[in-house]
Image (tube, grey):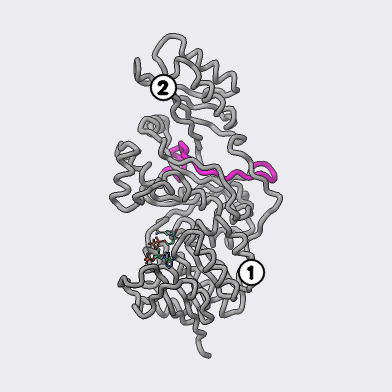
Amino acid sequence: MNTPHLRLGVIGAGNVGSAFVQMLNDPARQIALVDAATATLEVVGVAVRDTSLLRDGIDRSLVVGDALALAQRPDVDILVELAGGVEPARTWVETALRRGASVVTANKTLMAACGTELARLADENGADLLYEASVAGGIPIIRALRTSLAGEKINRVLGIVNGTTNFILSQMTSEGRDYGEALKEAQALGYAEADPTADVEAFDAAAKVQILSSLAIGTSLRGDPISREGISAVRSVDVEFAGRAGYVIKLIGVVERVGDNGISRRTHPVLISVEHPLAAVHGAMNAVFIEGDKSGPLMWLGLGAGGQPTATAVMGDVLHAARNRVSGRHDVPFTVDDRLASVDAGDIASVFYLSSDVRDEPGVLAQVAGVFGRHSVSILSMEQSGFGQEARLSFLTHEAVGRDVASTMQELEQLSAVDSIGACIRVIDGGGA
Ligand SMILES: NC(=O)c1ccc[n+]([C@@H]2O[C@H](COP(=O)([O-])OP(=O)(O)OC[C@H]3O[C@@H](n4cnc5c(N)ncnc54)[C@H](OP(=O)(O)O)[C@@H]3O)[C@@H](O)[C@H]2O)c1
């Protein structure tokens, strides 16, 4: 029997695209790839912006400048979109899906903005839309959620899904750097962009939270805004307090069931207990921690970025799409549960770490404690550090509702004895079964 032959069009030959094409053409992998794809695979075009550049490992005759024309080519069976952004990527992907070609993408921005619509379009046209590389790079979390955990009720997902911020916070923790120094170091090492906003203000993590939430719990992917707070306000004093209290600070993406039909999706810094498995995720590594109803805790750890790790996830999807095409099948789109309603982060209770700079004078503590009491926020422990102009109060609360904590901070700010309000960060303990 002849082995079927499938043609790939690749858009993008940057970090991920180049690594993917090189992996596909690696002579040492050919037998394994044909085995896994149940087909031979051929790249028939690679679209880039600048066609004059030589690309390592990519045959010059394959390089084209018109990505849309590649998506339209009737002989392209699988379009691999590795350029990024919403437009024109959305047009390319829709064009390929409409004519029944399958699409593999690493594009979290596109999936978070319109994944539900694109998945429906793929299904209507008997094609696959696969996006393993869009969350946590080389970690195969999407397939795990879609297959191994398809029958599990997932109660909570906690993810360290942005390597740049994890690197910065790790340097602040282990090397005692302040935020600015750690950011500069991340930029020098190529972990952070010259404009780091997407990472440090958690836009990147927010898109990944949306994708994880759609697969873990069944929310739609339509660009809904989710609660987002980055790490640029985290100070060395917060990191030091966390260390003394048995925590580390991490930027976490959270997807959490609340009651029967509520869902909270958010990304923000947390103080996480050193006992929690996520506390041991250092540097630019990513990890996803899942609390399943019957499975209990599960965790995946790995490289969340980088051309080669990300290309392995793209390759896994391409091989899956190839097998499906050969057998005339396609994956069903993820199910959207219309009963789910978003719960505001202000309504979610947790332990909080709060801090404020205060005047070191008699009566201040009583005033501050009074404010906590008026807003029903109960203090678990308090630490005073510094003297005179440098005095600072740090608190851990008992479990309290976000809205009450926010109003406590607002009233504290009005006190004449309070110079400035510092951190207001949620706390996560434990992590065991
Ligand atoms: N890098 C990672 O570690 C990583 C991890 C996970 C997911 N991803 C995702 O993977 C995708 C690619 O990331 P990357 O880091 O490889 O990006 P990149 O290095 O910036 O490469 C982007 C590629 O897309 C091409 N391109 C951009 N706009 C184009 C257009 N209008 N027409 C044709 N080609 C166009 C660029 O062409 P030129 O080379 O001519 O500029 C370049 O080759 C993104 O969606 C990203 O979010 C990346």
Q: Which residue is mark 2?
A: 357
Whether the residues at callouts 2 and 1 have beta carbons within 8 Å, the answer is no
**Rendered location of residue 277, percent (x, y):** 45, 45
**Residue 348, located in which quarter of the rendered image?**
top right
**Rendered location of residue 316, percent (x, y):** 48, 68
Residue visible at 49% across and 40% down in the picture = 229
Q: Secondary structure at mark 2?
A: strand
Q: If you read the primary sequence from the N terminus, does the residue marked by circle 2 or circle 1 appear first?
A: 1
Residue sticking out furthest to the top: 362
Mark 2 surroundings: few (<14), some (14-19) or many (≥20) residues within 10 A: many
The correct choice, above or below, for 301 with respect to 380 in the image is: below
Which quarter of the frame holds ligand 1?
bottom left
The correct choice, above or below, for 268 with respect to 374 in the image is: below
The correct choice, above or below, for 340 with respect to 98 in the image is: above
Residue visible at 35% across and 15% down in the picture = 388
Q: Which residues are magenta?
A: 258-279
Q: Which residue is mark 1?
A: 123
**Rendered location of residue 33, percent (x, y):** 44, 76
Query: Does residue 261 belong to the magenta stretch?
Result: yes
Q: Camera-side residue: 5 or 279?
A: 5
Q: Secondary structure at mark 1?
A: helix
The correct choice, above or below, for 338 with respect to 262 in the image is: below
Q: Camera-side residue: 317 or 16?
A: 16
